[in-house]
Amino acid sequence: MSPIVSIKRVGLAALLLLVSAVAFASPESKTKWTARLEQSDVRAGESAQIVLSATLDTGWHMYALDSPADATIPTTIRLAAATKLIKVNSKITQPAPIIHHDTNFNADLRYFSGAVAYGIPINVVANAKGEVKAVVEVKIQTCNDSICLPPESISVPVTFKVSSGPARTDRKAAITTVPKQPAGYIKPDAKPVTSVKKQDAIGSVAATSSNETENEINIAKRKGLLSFLWLSMLAGFAALLTPCVFPMIPITVSFFSKRKSNDGANPVAGPIAYCLGIISTFTGVGLLFAVVFGATKIQTFAAHPITNLLLGILFVVLAANLFGAYEIILPSSLVNKANAGTRKGGLVGPYLMGVTFTLTSFTCTVGFVGYLLVSASQGGLFYPIVGMLGFSSAFALPFFLLALFPQYLSQMPKSGQWLVSVKAFMGFLELAAALKFLSNADLSLQKGLLTRPVFLAIWAAIFAVAAIYLLGWLRMPHDDTDQKIGIPRRLLAVGTAVVAFWFLGAMNGQSLGTLEAFPPPDPYPGQHTVNAKIKWLTNYEDAVARAKSENKAIFINFTGVTCVNCREMEKNVLPLPEVVSGIEKFVPVELYTDRPNPEDQKNQQLLLKLANTTANPVYLVIDANGRVIKSVAGRHDPVLFAKFLKEAYAGSQQTASR
């Protein structure tokens, strides 16, 4: 993936913001270290061994001394330069590490989890006497199955007394044995590990998700902060391609096209405020919700029926404003302040518009943002802050340009009447967007008022009226009665009428392609018919019971009633014959996570547990005991998704044969 827009300035802005983030987000160490001299009696000129022990927090690991440096940050151990009375006289020893083959690097990663003890062979210098105070310097990186913390430098003191007497001949050779390991040491498996493994509290090994996004994020972290920031920005640009973003393009243009710049005002101020609304909401509100309420709550808020109902009403109000029914003006007190030289009031609207935009996009958050929110909710704030800043800055950049463009258009000569017509047409698009939010509210409440046919019929009516307006058969309050309808406007009217008929055809089963993501699912959630191509179960416990009785793995479709990307997958990918045949090899279960009911909240927690993310859609193949065999998140090409199912089935067969 390569961005088509220069992000140099965005990167600089994000880096400036990161300076403050670094100061407040120092990660907590996940290890505890001790050092002691193994021998109770050591004389000057003799060899000894310092036993350096580490205890890791549950679920965390650090890399071995010999883990490949091009794929990991291996542990390094040395004596501090100020240490004078002892010297390392051979290679530092370690026990057998856990080995896991990482397909991304095509390398065997070597690491320790639980606890580990290293042996540092030393020689006490000939003139040493009395008490020796030494410092062992350790550099490590600790990771769990979700995140890697920044590299950490640790100083471990060790003190011992040098015994009197001449050096003994049998104690001069370097001690290169591996020290006895502490109780928490986890031995490596007898067989090579070929998939990502997770160590639990008692040291047993359980398979975990091979989530694509998670792997990419962890690889970027290992390569450094700039690599992670770049990945965050690429994810921001990729998120612009998701269907839930599309309606905001005409809405952004229409919103800024009706704004009038005050004489002497900076035309860039409004677009900047708009982008700050996007960035601050993604970064600030997203992390705040994740830390205070848990990673799932921001999506719960965005999918709540009241939130969507208010957003739907907001867009209807904005559409009426574009039609010329009334003018939205600032209170006189704010206007007076603006005239006095304070233009802050004029930036409130764009900022709030950016906030509104961000809240709507949370309903189809890509896996990257969902993963970062989970990281934040678990206490690791450094990378979530960096990632959200990079993601939201890249995400906001094209909308800065879109917001800037109409203001310059409005300053062009003779732009008045045709711009009024453009604004009115944008009003129809805002009505279409409003219907999406009203549909989300209906889906959350399970009222069944806006089913797919009803939704498409209303959309068809909106675009039909828009075509009539473009042909001049309908006038808005601000339209010039003597205005002539030119050829470009007539062509646009014809195209709009074609779209209206297209929606009418879709009511009878015709595909809308990418736009299938917007109407409600058919059948309506909870109303799957016997003729559905996939016979979905809707309860996790029922799926587990069937999987055990039929000796099959489980395919889980984590979805949401307000998830636009879910709709696209369920209409354009999951029904395809090659995909259906793959899913039929498993026990298929469809679990909604975003409605305000106990069942969805339970499913939401299951999603967090199994996939370590809050993003929809997520597709997992698990065994009957809940162990994840393979997973993938987000929208996918049919060929790649069919390949995912094939690989997951092969993995399930291997699991069953063990």
Image (cartoon, helix red, strand yellow):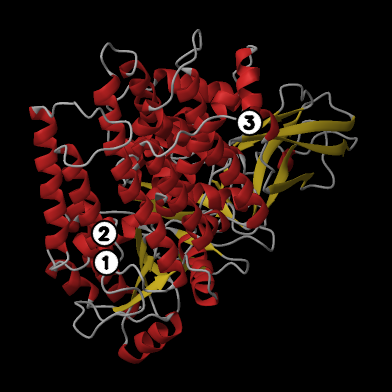
Identify the element where label 3 is drawn: helix
Task: Tell me the quarter of the image containing the N terminus.
Answer: top left
Q: Which quadrant of the figure has residue 185?
A: bottom right
Q: Residue at x 32, y 55 (%)?
A: 565
Mark 3 to mark 2 CA distance (whole Å) = 47 Å
The spot of residue 164 in percent (x, y) is 91, 35
| Mark 3 closeness class: few <14, some 14–19, many ≥20 residues within 10 Å | some
Give the amino acid at mark 3: Ala
In this picture, residue 88 sits left or right of residue 145 = right
Q: Nearer the viewer, residue 260 or 395?
A: 260
Q: Residue at x 54, y 49 (%)?
A: 373
Q: Earlier in the sequence, mark 3 or mark 1?
A: 3
Give the amino acid at mark 2: Ile
| Mark 1–mark 2 CB contact (< 8 Å) | yes
Q: Nearer the viewer, residue 389 or 657?
A: 389
Identify the element where label 1 is drawn: helix
Q: Earlier in the sequence, mark 3 or mark 2?
A: 3
Mark 1, residue position: 454
The spot of residue 460 in percent (x, y) is 20, 56
Q: Which label sits in the foreground, 3 or 1?
A: 1
Q: Which mark is residue 386?
A: none
Q: Is residue 511 visible?
A: no
Q: Is residue 363 above or below residue 340?
A: below
The spot of residue 62 in percent (x, y) is 57, 47
Mark 2, residue position: 458
Q: Residue at x 22, y 63 (%)?
A: 571
The spot of residue 410 in percent (x, y) is 33, 18
Give the amino acid at mark 1: Val
